[in-house]
């Protein structure tokens, strides 16, 4: 319908009618119809008895349109309701036939189409992108042997060890039942009450209070399968595996003040970032890696690999890269694809299998059940976004919204219809079908936790002591913020007592931030071990920390009097380095440059604060600076960029604006030399932070 021309006409009441010019001859392009294909003559007015009379009940056009509108929304996900997604492909690096028979891992260079969805956990579909929260990281591989859903998070561990506690966890973190708030936030009584009474959550709460829970974008966060899975090769040999997604864009987070302001400046920031990156051809990529090990190695560890609150440090077992994911296409329709996408951990292909992780085992049931409830039919797998791209043949029939048309009488097996010239349908195939790994398990039926799950603090200590000092300060400050929102003192004390088991100095820092006495350590169910730190867990100054401007966004502030000779080379250098230069002006129509020309802006200053950029440049003249020092949005633009530890490039004429914004020159405040600015703009200046805010 692109480029189509309409005849426009005003009705008697002044309403606009846009009408097909050729009277419906181009039915495939221009003729508006009902859902039954019946042409619509007037889409502006109901059928009435007289111009000012009552509406006729026979108006089927009105009834159908309103009926459909009333049912456009479906139940949102209970968790992971707020999500964004994209299409792409997985490219395998080398054959993994020695450890798995999964078809997508057999041939080097082979590409498998996929659909990836990123999400927050606690908030509703209408919440913001940037709360402190775990992020879902789910990937649906459309393989030759069926769909494989790798449904994980951006954190490698979880709050609970057994799926029976999942409803309690989510009820505690959701809006409090009697008051309906807070939305998408864990800083409240019920969550911390639950966490304090569930010491198994301590490791995860360290991650949730760290910078991992406030990622800068979906493109700059890791993903994890969380659980231990199995690979099974053609000979039936099993290898344990843990899955890791490593972002090629680097690992990056926000600072808390920045995350809060992003929520107001652009509630869709991370969704928009992903959309715009794909739209401009800057396709996000992640490497898929595995930690592969056998039973003997698992038994050598001081923790249980079936415990979802534990990880295996990369220094103990390095991650082996096995392929890469590239996201290169935004969905054509958000609802039809992103919203209707149904991920189920139980969707695995031959060569991938489960372990006895009790959290994983519960998820295998829960996800299938919740998709039916949300999408309204057991046939949700037939929706295009969920449908496998390989043949699907079975004897399952009917149900609400059946979208296929089976032929013949064979709806059961065994049958002998083929012997009589009729289609007999498919049959089982031991050679190519899924075969469950035959792990031998014996024992009594018991509702117990194994003793190997009892250590709740050693890995929490490992994580905290692995972090960069700046990250440790952020974590401690986050706990202070959260517990400051808790109104029941006993809950705060219980949380502090658990923290003493993690790190006594951390507990004292938090207690001091609350102006409370630090209690004695709570009783630990198992001895707390001093495990070796894992620098691979760091974001700041860690192995995935980025120091390049590539893929980032730079706000270039201009005003009347700006010089083209200053800004043009700078913009060109930013774009050459693979970043996006966004021209920001007090007025979206642009600014009048020193040579009298008008330079159009990409964004208006008041609507594009510096929180939406990774670095900023002030390409302003003395005249423009005088104007901007009187504009609160400009002062805040600079103040926030400095406070969020970003690089600021500034002309000499911009110094009065820097001074008014409270900027104290440091290595991150540079001139507008294109090469020097581009080099500096790829990083944050963490050494600046202690001068700017009180951290725990």
Image (spheres, grey):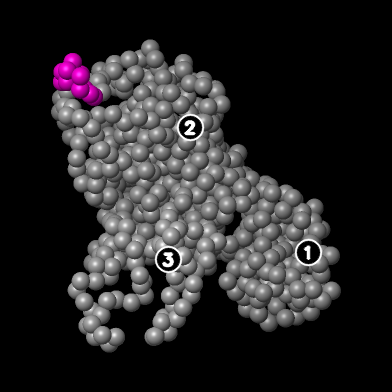
* Residue picked out by circle 2: 112
Disc 3 vs disc 2: which is toward the camera? Answer: 3
Query: Upstream in the sequence, badge 3 or badge 2?
Result: 3
Q: Nearest to the eye among marks 3 and 1: give it.
A: 3
Residue that sits furthest to the bottom in the current view: 52
Of callouts 3 and 1, the N-terminal one: 3
Image height of 327 relative to 67, above or below: above
- Label 3: state its secondary structure: loop
* Circle 2 SS class: strand
Most foreground residue, 492 or 84: 84
Looking at the image, which residue is at 46% across and 65% down?
A: 22
Residue that appears at 23% across and 82% down: 49
The residue that appears at 17% across and 29% down in the rendered structure is: 409
The image shows a total of numbered marks equal to: 3
Residue 175 lies in the magenta stretch: no
Mark sitting on residue 567:
1
Residue under label 3: 23
Bounds of the magenta span?
A: 414-425
Residue 224, quarter of the rendered image? top left
Residues at marks 2 and 1, CA–CA distance in whole angstroms: 43 Å
Asked where in the image residue 556 lies, by quadrant, the reply is bottom right
């Amino acid at each position: 319908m692109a480029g189509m021309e309409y005849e426009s006409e005003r009705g008697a009441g002044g309403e606009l009618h846009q009408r097909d010019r050729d009277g419906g001859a181009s039915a495939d392009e221009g003729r508006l119809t009902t859902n039954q294909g019946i042409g619509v003559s007037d889409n502006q007015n109901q059928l009435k008895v007289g111009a000012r009379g009552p509406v006729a009940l026979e108006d089927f056009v009105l009834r159908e349109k309103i009926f459909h509108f009333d049912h456009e929304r479906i139940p949102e996900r209970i968790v992971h309701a707020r999500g964004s997604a994209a299409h792409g492909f997985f490219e395998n690096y080398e054959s993994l036939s020695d450890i798995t028979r999964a078809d997508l891992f057999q041939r080097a260079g082979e590409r498998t189409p996929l659909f990836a969805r990123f999400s927050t956990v606690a908030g509703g579909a209408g919440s913001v992108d940037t709360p402190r929260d775990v992020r879902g990281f789910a990937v649906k591989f459309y393989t030759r042997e069926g769909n494989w859903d790798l449904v994980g998070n951006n954190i490698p561990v979880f709050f609970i060890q057994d799926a029976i506690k999942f409803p309690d966890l989510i009820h505690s973190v959701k809006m409090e039942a009697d008051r309906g708030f807070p939305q998408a936030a864990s800083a409240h009584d019920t969550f911390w009450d639950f966490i304090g009474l569930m010491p198994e959550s301590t490791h995860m709460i360290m991650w949730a209070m760290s910078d991992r829970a406030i990622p800068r974008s979906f493109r700059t966060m890791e993903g994890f399968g969380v659980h231990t899975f199995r690979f099974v090769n053609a000979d039936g040999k099993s290898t344990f595996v843990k899955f890791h997604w490593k972002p090629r864009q680097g690992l990056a987070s926000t600072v808390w003040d920045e995350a809060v302001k992003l929520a107001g400046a652009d509630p869709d920031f991370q969704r928009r970032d992903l959309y715009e990156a794909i739209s401009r051809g800057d396709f996000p990529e992640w490497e898929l890696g595995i930690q592969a090990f056998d039973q003997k190695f698992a038994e050598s560890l001081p923790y249980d690999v079936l415990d979802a609150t534990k990880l295996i440090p990369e220094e103990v077992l390095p991650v082996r890269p096995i392929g890469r994911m590239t996201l290169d296409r935004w969905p054509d329709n958000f609802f039809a694809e992103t919203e209707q996408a149904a991920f189920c951990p139980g969707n695995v292909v031959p060569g991938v299998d489960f372990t006895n992780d009790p959290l994983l085992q519960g998820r295998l049931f829960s996800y299938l059940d919740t998709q039916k409830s949300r999408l309204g039919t057991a046939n949700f797998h037939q929706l295009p976004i969920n449908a496998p791209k390989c043949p699907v043949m079975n004897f399952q029939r009917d149900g609400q919204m059946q979208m296929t048309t089976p032929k013949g009488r064979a709806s059961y097996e065994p049958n002998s219809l083929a012997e009589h010239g009729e289609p007999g349908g498919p049959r089982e195939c031991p050679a190519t079908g899924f075969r469950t790994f035959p792990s031998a398990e014996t024992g009594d039926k018991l509702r117990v936790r194994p003793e190997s799950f009892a250590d709740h603090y050693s890995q929490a200590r490992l994580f905290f002591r692995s972090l960069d000092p700046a990250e440790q300060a952020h974590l401690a400050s986050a706990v202070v913020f959260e517990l400051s929102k808790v109104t029941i003192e006993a809950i705060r004390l219980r949380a502090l007592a658990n923290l003493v088991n993690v790190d006594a100095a951390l507990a004292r820092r938090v207690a001091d931030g609350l102006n409370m006495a630090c209690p004695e350590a709570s009783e630990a169910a198992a001895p707390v071990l001093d495990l070796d730190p894992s620098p691979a867990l760091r974001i700041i100054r860690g192995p995935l920390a980025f120091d390049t401007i590539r893929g980032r966004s730079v706000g270039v502030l201009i005003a009347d009097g700006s010089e083209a000779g200053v800004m043009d080379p700078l913009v060109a250098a930013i774009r050459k380095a693979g970043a996006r230069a966004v021209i920001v002006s007090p007025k979206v129509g642009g600014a009048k440059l020193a040579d009298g020309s008008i330079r159009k802006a990409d964004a208006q200053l008041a609507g594009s604060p510096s929180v939406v950029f990774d670095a900023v440049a002030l390409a302003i003249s003395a005249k423009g600076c005088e104007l901007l020092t009187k504009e609160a949005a400009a002062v805040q633009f600079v103040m926030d960029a400095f406070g969020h530890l970003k690089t600021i490039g500034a002309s000499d004429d911009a110094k009065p604006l820097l001074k008014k914004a409270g900027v104290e020159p440091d290595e991150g405040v540079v001139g507008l030399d294109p090469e020097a600015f581009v080099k500096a703009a790829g990083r944050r200046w963490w050494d600046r932070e202690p001068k700017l805010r009180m951290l725990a």
